[in-house]
Image (cartoon, rainbow, N blue to C red):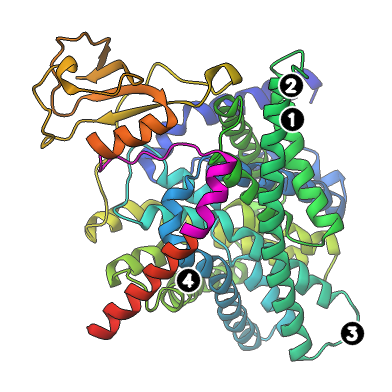
Amino acid sequence: MTTSSILALIGALLLLGAVSNKLSSKANMPILLAFLAIGMTATHFGLVPIASLSGRSVANGINVLGTVAMCFILYSGGLNTRFSSMRSVLLPASLLASVGVVVTALVTGVVCYFLQRWSGYDLGFAWCLLFGALVSSTDAAAVMSVLRNRNTGLKGRLQPLLEAESGSNDPAAYLLTILILKVMTSGGAPSFWEVLWQLAGGVLWGLCMGALMGFAFGIIAQWIYNAASRYKLLEYEGLYFVIGIAAVLLTFGLTETYLKANGLMAVYVCGITMGNIRFNFKKALTQFNDGISWLMQVSLFTALGFMVSPGELVKPLQLATGMLLAGILIFAARPLAVWLCLSGSEFTARERLLVSWVGLRGAAPIMLATFPLAANIPYAQSIFNQVFFVVISSILCQGSTLMPLARLLDLSCPADDRERIPLELEVTDSGGDAEMFEFVVPSDAPFVGITVAELGLPAEALILLIRRDRGFFSPRGNTRIAAGDGLLIMGPGGVMRDLGKRFFPAADYHPARTLEDIRRSFPSLSSQLAMEKIAHVLRRRHN
């Protein structure tokens, strides 16, 4: 293929991915699954000359691409995560992202080991445990693409829990994979306790230090953005996006190289930190990273499709083993990990059942499966094919039935199909601490039917637009407020906070905070979490 034809093909794939996002919403599964098929088809018909390269060189290249892609996918997911919604699910999400990953890996690895012994292929317990680690985490891209489309919605704390878990459990699976590979390639035969000590120490140090470094890099990046804007250090606004890319790469690279901690966790926490704090050009950076994240997902899924031959997947033994392992993961390992981690929590049996079913696997397990290929361990291609089969089974089985199950369990909620607000506020030095938010007027609000002038808003707050009947208009003083109206209000952060508490107490309004706000919130946050835990224990004892 010529360079021009390759570029045309890439452009067509990107356009296809963008316009078929609506199809993904209707099908309740990531449309990125189609790009896996495109990659496999391209290799099968010789459109991509993968066969002319060695398997290890291809694995190394896709491994690098996968690592970079996961960095930007997790960073973008963190930028779009509100810590206020995560705070109530922080403990169960952390357990699912750490203990849940280990339990899933162990259960899957043990079952895989006995299946191998039963079939007469004894590849060793370490090989099976490695397979369990590769498929132990849910995929952030797959979960968020299903949960964040406009046709779905989950009640209560389920959606924040699932998004927080999927965004933070990839680092644990990544760390388990690296540690098990290190044990397998060390040449020795370490004891069970030595392996357990390495895993426990690696998980604790890697995840905790990675989270700490992510928070630190997020604060540093915020200071750089504000300083660059205040002192006019950049001649072109486009360079602010370059700083954002540099922040992601530096966060991952420095954390992995000098602290030997988990860079993926650092990137994710850096994104959460920057997504919940005020800095200049934040909105533009968030939108830019949404596009980068989508580009990375398309590139990664297509490239991963290059690694698999359709003929290998449909071999009888490969097919039977893959179906058994996928069934064990979906119906045994994932539910056991969820019920163990959520035992004693306030989540009901129906909610735990749904969380057990939202175990979508995606690009992360397939990307991690390139590590054994790059390390050239025995039967690495076989383990890659098995992981690929498990991912396809998970997306087809769980992705397509997720929302029907949520409706059956009465855990779904109506989708928000409102039109996008035609005005946006970008934070700059000249904007001060201004905030803009759309408050929806409840049907039982005491001010329904009165005029804007009679509402009595603070003088610093201004109603810019009113959304009504899928349209927008600028209000006047004699405009009467109706139930269901969306009031787009702008004002200083403190005024907007008070306004929300006074007029719209049920609104999901969480303004971005300053660094000083975050510093002051740590003692209160710790106290609040402690009080919630004590109250929960007292309720259990009373019952």
* Mark 4 crowd level (few <14, some 14–19, many ≥20, 10 Å Cα): many
Q: Position of residue 522 (x, y in %)?
A: 53, 56
- Kindly identify the amino acid type of the residue bearing the numbered disc 3: Gly
**First in sequence: mark 4 vs mark 2:** 2
Tell me the quarter of the image containing the N terminus: top right
**Residue matched to label 2:** 239
- Which image quadrant is residue 369 in? bottom right
**First in sequence: mark 2 vs mark 3:** 3
Q: Which mark is residue 419?
A: none
Span colored in magenta? 504-524
**Residue matched to label 4:** 334
Is residue 41 shown above or below 385?
above
- Kindly identify the amino acid type of the residue bearing the numbered disc 1: Ile
Determine the secondary structure under disc 2.
helix
Q: Residue at x 18, y 29 (%)?
A: 484
Q: Position of residue 541 (x, y in %)?
A: 28, 85
**First in sequence: mark 1 vs mark 3:** 3
Q: Contact, CB < 8 Å: mark 2 with mark 1?
A: yes
